[in-house]
C-alpha cells in the first residue's frame, strides 16, 4: 500500500513537470510514512512542505494542488490535509481486505519482489585459531537473519564467511602441533577438541621458549611460501577448527555451510597484485620500511595523517590488504551490487579506510555499494563486556548450554505433566530462540546487556512471548479443523479487525526496511506489534463464536494470515516455531 501511494505521488510530480509547476528536471524525494494516530489516516506524506519552495506557494496550497492532481485510486478512501500541510491517506477497507485475501493465497504472503540484486554478505567470519566465543554471536545471528530476508525477497545472496585462517598465529599453532605429534603421535589431534586450551598452551610455549618462537616464525614463512608439509598441517588444523564452527552454526540454526567459507587465505595469491596496482597508481608511500597509503580523509586526533598499512617492512601483509583483495573479488568475480559487512563497530575506522581506498584505486565497480553493518558490544549485567566469572572469554557452546538448561527449567515449570522428550525438544527451541531473539530485537548499533532472565521472560518483546503467541493463534485452527474456508472472504468491519488487517498489510514494507538497513530489530518490533494487535482483536472479536458464519470464516482467515506472517517472520529471523509449548 505504501508503494502504491508512493507511485501515485510520483505520477503527480510527473504531471506537475508537464504543466511546468515544477522544473522538468526536478528530483522529488517522496517520503510516505505510517501515521501514529489513526485520526490521521493510515499513511502520510510531507511532500507539500518539500515542494513549497519550488512551487512558490504556501504548503497547504501545494497540498491542495497535489490532492487535485493525484490520480484516482480505488485503494484510497479519503485524502485530507492536516496541520502545516501534511497529506493524510485513508486506505479503503475493501481494498485492504482484498490485499489480505491475496496475501493468504500466495506463498510469499503477497510480498512484492524488488529488482533482483547480487548481494554479498560477509558475516560470522571468526578467527579460526580460537573457538567461537560470544564476540562472534552478533555477527553470526544478525547476518544470518538479513541473509534469510534478502533471499526471501528474491535476491541472489552470496554468503561469505571471511574466516581468519591466515596470519602469524598459525606458525605458533603449527609448531605446537608438531611438538605434540612428536610426543604423542596421531593422538595429538585429540588435543584440538578444545581449541581454546590448545591456543593457550601454544601461547605458553611461544612465550617461554625462544627456540619454539623461532620455529613458529620459520613455519609461518614456510607456510606462506607454499611448503607442502606445512600446508598439510595447516589444512588439518583449519578443518578441525572449522568443524567446530559448523557445529555451532547447526546448533544455532544458522544457514552457513562449509561452501560459504572464503577466508583470508583464499586471497593469498592476489596480495602481490594489490600492492602492485596501488603502486602503479602512485598511491603507495614508504613509512619506516612499510608500504602504506595516506588518504586525506583520515587523520589522527592530533591531526596527523593516518595510514592504511598494506605491507609490513618484513614483507608480511595485513588485514587491510586482504580486505582490498576481497572487495575486488566481490566486485569483479561475484558481481555484487551490494556488499554488506556484519562486523563489530570497533572496526568502523578500518572499513571506512579500506572502502574509501578501494574506490580510489578503482578496485570495485562504482555502482557497487560497500556497507559496514556495524554492531555494538554484548555486555554482562554489570555493563561491561560479557565475561566468565573468572574474567575469561565465554565460549559460545557454554552459553548455549546454559540457555538450554534454563529453558528446560522454565518449560517444565509451565508444564509439570509433560513427558521428558517433548520437554527437551521445546526447551531446545526456546533456549536457542531466546538467545537469538534477544540479540536480534535490539538495534544493532547499540551495546546491549545479555540477561538470561530477560530473554526467557514471557512478558515483553521476547522469544518466549512470540513463540507462545504463535501457538495460541495456531491453536485456534485445531478447534476449527472441520470448517471449510475455501469460499471464505475477509471482510473488515470491527475496529479491531481493521487494526489487525492494517498491521498485517505492513509486512512487505517492514522487510524492505530491514534489508535496506540491515536491521532485524525492525522485523522483531513488527512481529511483537502484530502479536499484540492479534490479542486485542481476539479479545474484542469472538472467532468461533462469531455472530454469523461469514464473520466466523473471515476472522478465521485473519487468524490464519496472522499465523502465517508470524511463522514466516520468525523463520526469517532464523527462529523455529512450536505448535505447543
Ligand atoms: N576475522 C575478523 C575478526 O574476527 C572479522 C572479519 C570480518 N570481515 C572482513 N572482511 N574483514 O575480527
Image: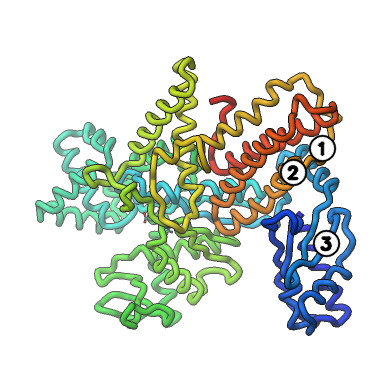
**Ligand 1 falls in quadrant:** bottom left
Task: State the residue at coordinates (33%, 65%).
Answer: 317
Mark 3 and mark 2 lie on one chain; the one further toward the N terminus is 3
Residue where numbered disc 3 is placed: 79
**Which percent across, then down, holds residue 348?**
42, 65
Can you tell which of label 3 and label 2 is closer to the viewer? 3
Residue 410, x across and y down, in percent: 43, 28
Q: Is mark 2 within 8 Å of ligand 1?
A: no
The quarter of the rendered structure image containing the N terminus is bottom right
Q: Which one is nearer the viewer's eye here, 523 or 179? A: 523
In space, the residues marked 1 and 2 are separated at their CA atoms by: 9 Å
Which mark is drawn over residue 498? none
Quarter of the view holding residue 501: top right
Q: Relative to 25, is 188 on the left or the right?
A: left
Identify the element where label 3 is drawn.
strand
Note whether 401 is above or below 423 in the view shown. below
Q: Are marks 3 and 2 in contact (CB under 8 Å)?
A: no
Which mark is on residue 490? 1
Q: Position of residue 524 (x, y in %)?
A: 56, 46
Which residue is denoted by mark 2 in the rendering?
501
CB of residue at label 1: within 8 Å of ligand 1?
A: no
Amino acid at each position: 500500500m505504501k508503494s502504491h501511494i508512493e507511485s501515485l505521488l510520483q505520477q503527480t510530480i510527473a504531471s506537475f513537470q508537464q504543466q511546468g509547476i515544477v522544473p522538468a528536471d526536478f528530483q522529488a524525494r517522496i517520503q510516505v510514512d505510517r501515521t501514529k494516530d489513526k485520526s490521521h489516516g493510515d499513511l502520510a506524506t510531507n511532500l507539500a512542505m518539500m515542494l513549497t519552495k519550488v512551487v512558490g506557494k504556501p504548503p497547504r496550497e501545494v497540498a491542495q494542488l497535489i490532492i487535485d492532481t493525484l490520480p484516482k485510486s480505488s485503494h484510497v478512501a479519503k485524502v485530507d490535509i492536516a496541520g502545516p500541510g501534511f497529506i493524510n491517506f485513508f486506505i479503503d477497507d475493501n481494498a485492504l481486505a482484498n490485499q489480505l485475501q491475496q496475501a493468504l493465497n500466495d506463498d510469499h504472503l503477497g510480498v512484492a519482489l524488488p529488482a533482483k540484486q547480487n548481494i554479498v554478505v560477509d558475516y560470522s567470519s571468526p578467527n579460526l585459531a580460537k573457538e567461537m566465543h560470544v564476540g562472534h554471536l552478533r555477527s553470526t545471528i544478525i547476518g544470518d537473519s538479513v541473509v534469510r530476508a534478502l533471499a526471501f525477497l528474491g535476491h541472489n545472496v552470496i554468503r561469505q564467511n571471511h574466516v581468519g585462517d591466515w596470519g602469524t598465529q598459525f606458525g605458533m599453532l603449527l609448531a605446537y602441533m608438531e611438538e605434540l605429534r612428536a610426543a604423542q603421535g596421531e593422538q595429538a589431534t585429540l588435543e584440538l577438541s578444545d581449541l581454546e586450551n590448545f591456543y593457550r598452551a601454544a601461547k605458553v610455549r611461544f612465550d617461554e621458549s625462544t627456540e619454539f618462537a623461532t620455529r613458529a616464525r620459520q613455519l609461518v614463512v614456510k607456510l606462506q611460501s607454499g611448503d607442502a608439509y606445512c600446508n598439510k598441517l595447516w589444512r588439518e588444523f583449519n578443518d578441525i577448527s572449522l568443524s567446530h564452527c559448523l557445529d555451532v552454526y547447526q546448533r544455532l540454526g544458522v544457514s552457513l555451510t562449509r561452501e560459504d567459507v572464503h577466508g583470508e587465505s583464499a586471497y593469498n595469491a592476489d596480495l602481490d597484485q594489490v600492492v602492485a596496482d596501488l603502486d602503479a597508481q602512485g598511491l603507495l608511500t614508504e613509512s619506516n620500511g612499510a608500504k602504506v597509503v595516506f588518504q586525506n580523509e583520515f587523520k589522527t586526533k592530533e591531526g596527523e595523517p593516518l595510514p592504511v598499512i598494506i605491507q609490513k617492512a618484513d614483507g608480511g601483509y595485513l588485514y587491510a590488504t586482504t580486505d582490498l583483495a576481497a572487495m575486488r573479488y566481490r566486485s569483479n568475480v561475484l558481481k555484487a551490487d551490494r556488499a554488506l559487512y556484519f562486523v563489530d563497530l570497533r572496526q568502523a575506522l578500518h572499513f571506512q579506510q579500506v572502502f574509501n581506498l578501494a574506490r580510489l584505486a578503482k578496485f570495485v565497480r562504482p555502482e557497487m555499494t560497500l556497507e559496514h553493518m556495524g554492531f555494538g558490544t554484548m555486555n554482562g549485567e554489570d555493563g561491561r563486556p560479557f565475561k566468565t566469572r573468572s574474567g575469561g572469554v565465554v565460549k559460545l557452546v557454554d552459553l548455549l548450554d546454559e540457555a538450554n538448561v534454563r529453558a528446560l527449567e522454565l518449560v517444565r515449570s509451565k508444564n509439570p505433566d509433560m513427558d521428558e522428550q517433548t520437554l527437551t525438544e521445546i526447551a531446545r527451541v526456546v533456549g536457542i530462540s531466546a538467545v537469538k531473539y534477544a540479540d536480534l530485537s535490539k538495534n544493532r548499533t547499540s551495546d546491549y546487556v545479555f540477561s538470561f532472565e530477560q530473554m526467557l521472560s514471557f512478558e515483553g518483546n521476547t522469544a518466549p512471548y512470540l513463540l507462545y503467541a504463535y501457538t495460541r493463534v495456531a491453536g485456534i485452527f485445531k478447534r476449527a479443523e472441520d470448517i471449510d474456508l475455501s469460499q471464505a472472504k475477509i471482510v473488515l468491519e470491527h475496529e479491531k479487525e481493521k487494526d489487525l488487517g492494517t498491521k498485517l498489510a505492513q509486512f512487505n514494507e517492514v522487510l524492505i526496511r530491514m534489508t535496506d538497513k540491515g536491521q532485524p530489530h525492525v522485523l522483531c518490533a513488527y512481529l511483537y506489534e502484530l502479536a499484540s494487535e492479534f490479542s486485542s482483536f481476539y479479545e474484542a472479536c469472538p472467532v468461533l463464536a462469531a455472530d454469523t458464519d461469514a464473520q466466523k470464516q473471515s476472522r478465521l482467515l485473519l487468524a490464519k494470515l496472522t499465523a502465517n506472517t508470524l511463522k514466516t517472520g520468525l523463520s526469517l529471523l532464523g527462529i523455529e516455531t512450536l505448535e505447543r509449548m
